[in-house]
């Protein structure tokens, strides 16, 4: 399986909580931005939100990021 983003390489503070927040909130934020952009595009120039190019790219992104997200969410936090 190919992992798209290695969070261990992005910073020095990489614990379970940081990894969990990053792998869940970054895709949610990207989804919100894409849907907002598609809504504005549909309001200005007509069309449908779910038929736009941005929504198609969002589905592709979610397809690649979902395995990493589910792996992090189902992994247990280390006991302290």
Image (tube, helix red, strand yellow):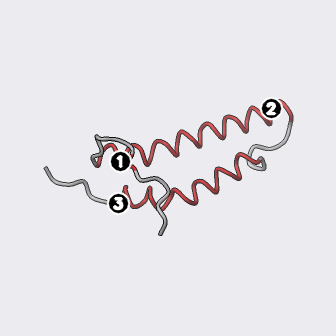
Q: Is residue 67 left or right of residue 37?
A: left
What is the spatial separation of the Cα atoms under label 2 and label 1, in whole angstroms? Answer: 36 Å
Crowd band around label 3 with a 10 angstrom C-alpha radius: few (<14), some (14–19), many (20+): few
3 or 41: which is nearer to us? 3
Q: Which residue corresponds to mark 2?
A: 43
Q: Is residue 26 above or below residue 3?
A: above
- Nearer the camera: disc 2 or disc 1: 1
Looking at the image, which residue is at 52% across and 46% down?
27
- Nearer the camera: disc 3 or disc 1: 1
* Mark 2 vs 1: CB contact within 8 A: no
Q: Which residue corresponds to mark 1?
A: 19
What is the spatial separation of the Cα atoms under label 3 and label 1, in whole angstroms? Answer: 12 Å
What is the spatial separation of the Cα atoms under label 2 and label 3, in whole angstroms? Answer: 39 Å
24 or 19: which is nearer to us? 19
Q: Which residue corresponds to mark 3?
A: 74
Of marks 3 and 1, which one's residue comes earlier in the chain? 1
SS under mark 2: helix
Looking at the image, the residue that sits furthest to the left is 80
SS under mark 1: helix
Q: Is residue 7 above or below residue 32?
A: below
Q: Is residue 38 left or right of residue 2?
A: right
* Mark 3 vs 1: CB contact within 8 A: no
Q: Is residue 25 left or right of residue 72?
A: right
Of marks 2 and 1, which one's residue comes earlier in the chain? 1
Looking at the image, which residue is at 37% across and 48% down?
9
Corner quadrant of residue 59: bottom right
Looking at the image, which residue is at 24% across and 54% down?
77
SS under mark 3: helix
Of marks 2 and 3, which one's residue comes earlier in the chain? 2
Looking at the image, the residue that sits furthest to the bottom is 1
Crowd band around label 1 with a 10 angstrom C-alpha radius: few (<14), some (14–19), many (20+): some
Q: Percent x, y for residue 49?
A: 75, 43
């Amino acid at each position: 399986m190919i992992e798209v983003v290695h969070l261990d390489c992005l910073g020095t503070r990489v614990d379970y909580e940081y990894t969990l927040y990053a792998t869940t909130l970054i895709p949610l934020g990207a989804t919100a931005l894409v849907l907002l952009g598609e809504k504005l595009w549909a309001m200005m120039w007509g069309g449908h939100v779910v038929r736009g190019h941005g929504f198609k790219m969002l589905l592709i992104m979610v397809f690649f990021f979902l395995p990493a997200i589910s792996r992090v969410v189902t992994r247990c936090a280390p006991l302290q």
